Image: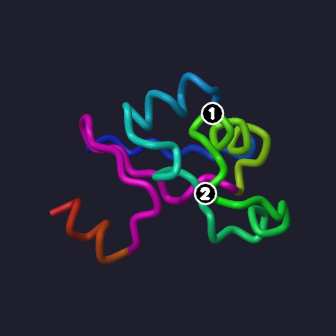
Amino acid sequence: MIINDRDFFKTPFTRAEIEALLHGKPAADMFSFRSPSFKALGLEQEKLNDNELINLMLKEPRLIRRPIVKLGKMVYFGADSKKLTEILQ
């Protein structure tokens, strides 16, 4: 198993990397709507489209759900310890 640990606060994702991680999934899957950073923006979740969500994540990495776990072609956003254990078995 290859583990690639990346601090995306120091090395932010590019738009292409985010789109590749999403692999056709909605940007909301990767977006942390519970983040204090999102709440501080005062935006309405329902009114944001994928492009706007990606733009927000590019500007503010705290809006990306963590951790991001990629196994083969599968990508999991914000997996908790129970889910991670299930994934890794």
Name the quadrant of the N terminus.
top left
Question: Is disc 1 surrounded by few (<14), some (14 to 19) or many (20+) residues within 10 Å?
Answer: few
Question: Is disc 2 surrounded by few (<14), some (14 to 19) or many (20+) residues within 10 Å?
Answer: few
Left or right? Give the position of 21 relative to 75. right
Front residue of 88 and 47: 47
Residue 65 belongs to the span the image colors magenta: yes
Residue extending farthest left: 89
Q: Real-space Cα distance between discs 1 and 2?
A: 13 Å
SS class, disc 2 = helix
Q: Where residue 86 sits in the image (x, y, percent)?
A: 20, 68
Mark earlier in primary sequence (1, 2): 2
Vertical order, 68 against 87 (above or below): above
Left or right? Give the position of 15 relative to 9. left
Q: Is residue 3 visible?
A: yes
SS class, disc 1 = helix
Instruction: Please give the residue where the numbered disc 2 appears in the rendered image.
Output: 46
Q: Where residue 41 sits in the image (x, y, percent)?
A: 84, 60
Front residue of 77 and 2: 77
Q: Where residue 89 sits in the image (x, y, percent)?
A: 15, 63
Vertical order, 61 against 72 (above or below): below
Q: How many marks?
A: 2
Residue 81: which numbered mark, if any?
Answer: none
Instruction: Please give the residue where the numbered disc 1 appears in the rendered image.
Output: 51
For the magenta stretch, what is the residue range? 63-80
Q: Where residue 25 sits in the image (x, y, percent)?
A: 39, 40
Q: Is residue 11 visible?
A: no
